[in-house]
Image: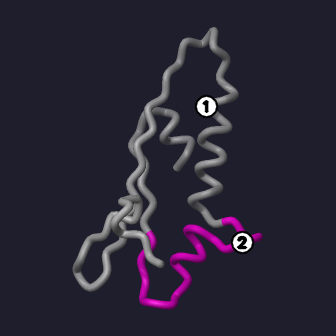
Amino acid sequence: ILQAAFEGYNACMFAYGQTGSGKTFTMMGYPGEVGIIPRICESLFSHTDDCSPEENITFKVEISYLEIYNERVRDLLHKSNKKG
């Protein structure tokens, strides 16, 4: 996914399954066990940092983090949707 994004393609990751099947664990992980999203973010920004200024490359990163539950879409990055 990450390599394709650096080649100019849009990238999307989708976790689907019933409640309690491990989607959150797989995507985000838990303390001490990093999930897919933090790993991709680390690799993404590490790669952008590795590009030399002489290459004159710019990056635009846009992120969406959505949850669909009971036929309702929730933006998990929006402040009003935080739990707790």
Picture coordinates of residue 48 (x, y %)? Answer: 61, 31
Residue ranking furthest to the right: 32
**Quarter of the image where one finds residue 73:** bottom left
Give coordinates of residue 31: x percent, y percent. Answer: 72, 71
Q: In this view, does 22 lie to the left or right of 66?
A: right
What residue sits right under mark 1 in the picture? 48
Q: What residue type is labelled 1?
A: Thr
Of residues 77 and 13, which is closer to you in this image? 77
Residue drawn at x 64%, y 71% is 29
> From mark 2 to mark 1, how far is it between C-alphas?
26 Å
Q: Does the magenta stretch include residue 36?
A: no
For the magenta stretch, what is the residue range? 15-34
Residue 4 drawn at (x, y percent): 50, 41
Above or below, 11 against 73 in this view is: above
Q: Identify the residue shown where x is 42% and y is 89%.
A: 18
Q: Nearer the viewer, mark 2 or mark 1?
A: 2
Give the x, y percent position of residue 77: 41, 59
